């Protein structure tokens, strides 16, 4: 019987069967397109990294030749780059990587004025977003699942054939389950085929992170089938089921996420990065009119190890100049810390709320697994701050003693890379799906058990 049910599903009616095949083809086609969108994005990221590496290797010796007698002036211009590692899996879930830079180039001057620099991007493109695999999975797969299941029982009842099915089937509830499993197998096959194609196309390694990514995708599809199973158990007309399921889709994917975003924005207002940058610049520029001794004393309070460095003759008083730059960062540290804290609060609040919204949970988890979400960006910013501090501590003694420029091997300065090793717990990734799948599947099973013989 299940074989006949499969044939009926694929070939049911002149137009319905064609619609099913067109829907499957469309979803597979857009899934394949999403892989090439991701591949193009990954290639752009890699090209940017290659350009930065080549630029640093050629620019440092060139600048050293131009400013060979003044270490302070040379380090005024040099930009040291740090890369936020882009994993192959990022091509499947681009997340915020199209907004936040994957390469940060900073001088040893004030950090807060440089930390929020981003690539110039057409805002219209950012508004439209990327049709990556995560978009296809989160938004389009549920529509196909709804199209496959909204009339799975009601259509038989409306055509008057359900009584025949009920008579021929010894275990009617098991047969209903088989109908859903049949459709689940078809949808799952499409998803697995897209992921299987992504592995060689995007060069994705077969590791535990890919397993969790795949588990998240499977869990999301099972969640939507459990919702459709519950709606089918309500025994409404096909049109009613379709409207109800589309309403659920709109609520879970449009209305609730928009409401959550508005709530988090109002609950955790974030001071603009521009305000932090202006505070840093104000703290720096005010020092031009401040007594040099007072500025240096504040600098030595921050870095007491440099107090003992002997003063040498230089074309410019670089010790005082970089002290001003440092104090600009120090005086904007309060705003910078507030900005960092509010962003972290937003990220934590989003994750907490998402535990009760499988759609939002899926988006956040795919971004976290692909290292393309807000959490990754916050950790990259922290690493950039540490990298900047490291370069300052290395450079200050060279500047204050006016060390010979040409004695330094400038080609030895390599582009640094941030590798995000934040732990990912499988239970936190999959637990939400298990809970909601069990809830809706249980409600549907209980409803069917109550009314199975009255269908």
Image (cartoon, helix red, strand yellow):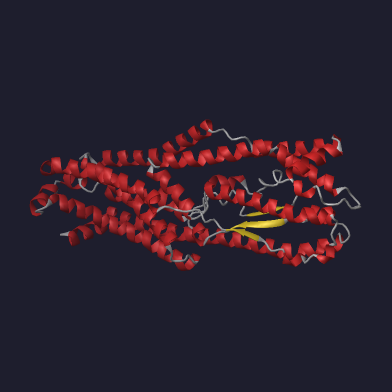
Compared across the picture, whether 275 is left or right of 145 comes to: right
Q: x, y percentage for residue 62?
A: 81, 64
Question: As displayed, is residue 416 above or below residue 295?
Answer: below
Q: x, y percentage for residue 35?
A: 48, 60
Foreground of the two, 9 or 245: 245
Residue at the image position 27 percent from the left and 46 percent from the top: 438
Does any portion of residue 232 appear in the rendered image?
A: no
Foreground of the two, 418 or 198: 418
Image quarter of the N terminus: bottom left
Residue found at the very far bottom of the displayed protein: 200
Question: As displayed, is residue 294 above or below residue 110?
Answer: above
Q: Quadrant of residue 335?
A: top right
Q: x, y percentage for residue 385?
A: 65, 49
Residue at the image position 75 percent from the left and 40 percent from the top: 328
Compared across the picture, whether 146 is left or right of 179 comes to: right
Foreground of the two, 265 or 284: 284
Residue found at the very far front of the displayed protein: 308
Residue found at the very far top of the displayed protein: 266
Q: x, y percentage for residue 340?
A: 59, 41
Compared across the picture, whether 411 is left or right of 338 comes to: right
Residue at the image position 31 percent from the left and 51 percent from the top: 222
Q: Quadrant of residue 248?
A: top left
């Amino acid at each position: 019987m299940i074989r006949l049910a499969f044939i009926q599903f694929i070939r049911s009616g002149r137009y319905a069967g064609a619609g099913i095949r067109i829907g499957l083809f469309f979803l597979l086609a857009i899934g394949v397109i999403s892989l090439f969108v991701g591949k193009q994005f990954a290639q752009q990221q890699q090209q940017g990294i290659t350009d930065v590496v080549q630029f640093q290797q050629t620019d440092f010796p060139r600048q050293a030749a131009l400013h060979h007698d003044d270490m302070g002036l040379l380090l005024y211009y040099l930009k040291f780059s740090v890369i936020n590692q882009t994993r192959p899996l990022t091509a499947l879930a681009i997340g915020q990587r199209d907004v936040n830079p994957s390469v940060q180039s900073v001088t040893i001057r004030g950090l807060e004025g440089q930390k929020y620099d981003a690539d110039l991007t057409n805002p219209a493109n950012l508004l439209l977003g990327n049709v990556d695999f995560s978009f296809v999975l989160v938004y389009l797969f549920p529509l196909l699942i709804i199209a496959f299941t909204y009339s799975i029982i009601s259509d038989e009842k409306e055509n008057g054939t359900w009584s025949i099915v009920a008579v021929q089937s010894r275990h009617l509830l098991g047969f209903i389950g088989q109908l859903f499993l049949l459709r689940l197998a078809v949808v799952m096959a499409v998803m697995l085929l897209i992921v299987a194609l992504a592995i060689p196309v995007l060069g994705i390694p077969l590791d535990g992170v890919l397993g969790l990514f795949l588990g998240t995708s499977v869990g999301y599809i099972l969640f939507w089938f459990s919702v459709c199973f519950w709606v089918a158990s309500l025994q409404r007309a096909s049109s009613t089921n379709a409207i109800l399921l589309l309403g659920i889709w709109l609520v879970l994917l449009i209305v609730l996420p928009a409401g959550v975003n508005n709530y988090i924005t109002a609950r955790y207002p974030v001071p603009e990065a521009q305000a932090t940058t202006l505070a840093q610049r104000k703290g720096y520029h005010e020092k031009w009119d401040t007594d040099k001794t007072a500025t240096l004393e504040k600098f030595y309070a921050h870095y007491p190890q440099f107090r003992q460095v002997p003063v040498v003759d230089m074309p410019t008083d670089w010790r005082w100049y970089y002290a001003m730059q440092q104090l600009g960062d120090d005086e904007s540290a309060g705003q910078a810390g507030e900005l960092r804290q509010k962003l972290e609060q937003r990220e934590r609040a989003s994750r907490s709320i998402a535990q009760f919204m499988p759609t939002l949970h899926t988006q956040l988890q795919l971004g976290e697994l692909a290292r393309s979400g807000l959490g990754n960006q916050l950790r990259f910013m922290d690493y950039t701050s540490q990298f900047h501090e490291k370069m300052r501590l290395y450079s200050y003694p060279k500047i204050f003693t006016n060390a010979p420029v040409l004695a330094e091997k400038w080609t030895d300065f390599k582009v640094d890379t941030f590798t995000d090793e934040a732990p990912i717990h499988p239970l936190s990734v999959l637990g939400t799906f298990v809970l909601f799948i069990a809830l809706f599947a249980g409600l549907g099973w209980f409803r069917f058990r109550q009314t199975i013989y009255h269908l």
